[in-house]
Image (cartoon, grey):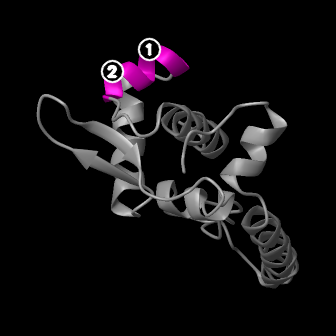
Amino acid sequence: MSASTKLSSSVKALCFLSVSYPLPKTSKEIAENTGINASKLRKLLSLLSKSKIVISNQGTKGGFQLLKSPKEINLQEIYCSIEDRKAFHFDVSEIVGQDDYDYLGYFNNLFSSIQVDIESKMTKISLLSIMNYLNIKSNFK
């Protein structure tokens, strides 16, 4: 699953949990209502749970619930929860000569700058703002 797919799937699942709040929802219910592959969804929910964005309750009335308000959850937090690398990953395994090092230095600086810009922008985008844009009403109080 690519980064953009993982991020959009995570946002979609979190929106669903916000709408269904305070009722816990199983991964099967979330998958059926969002169209996300159930196996991939469980992996994402596990990562979001480790980051304390959602909580997993066991038992017959168990399931997943939002742990934080959609207003307090930003895209950067979600992205960092589900990804183990930066948005721009620069492969340096093919470096041969000095010219390659010059190119590497240039692109490393360029991508670092872009990465900072991306992270800054993602920090300013809350789950609630996405829900508002999509006309999705949160039940999180």
Side of 82 where 46 appears, left or right:
left
Left or right: 35 as drawn, with respect to 3: left
Question: Residue at position x 21%, y 35% from top?
Answer: 62
Q: Which disc, if any, is residue 28?
A: 2
In the rendered view, tell whether residue 14 sits above or below residue 95.
Answer: above
State the image quarter where residue 79 is shown.
bottom right
Which residue: 59% across, 37% down?
Answer: 15
Question: Would you say the residues marked 1 and 2 are in contact, meaning their CB atoms lie under 8 Å apart?
Answer: yes
**Could you tell me which secondary element the residue under label 2 belongs to?**
helix
The answer to which image quadrant residue 126 occupies is: bottom right
Which residue range is magenta in the image? 26-35
Residue at the image point whose x is 78% and y is 77% from the top: 112
Q: Is 33 part of what is drawn in magenta? A: yes
Principal secondary structure, stretch drawn in magenta = helix
Amino acid type of the residue that numbered disc 2 sits on in the rendered structure: Lys
According to the image, label 1 marks what residue? 32
Picture layout, residue 119 above or below residue 97: above
Q: Position of residue 86 (x, y in %)?
A: 63, 65
Q: Residue at x 30, y 28 (%)?
A: 26
Q: Nearer the viewer, residue 110 or 71?
A: 71
Tell me the tag on residue 13: none
In the picture, measured across the screen, residue 27 lies left or right of residue 99, that is left
Q: What whole-number distance in Å separates the C-alpha atoms at marks 1 and 2?
A: 6 Å
Q: Give the secondary structure at mark 1.
A: helix
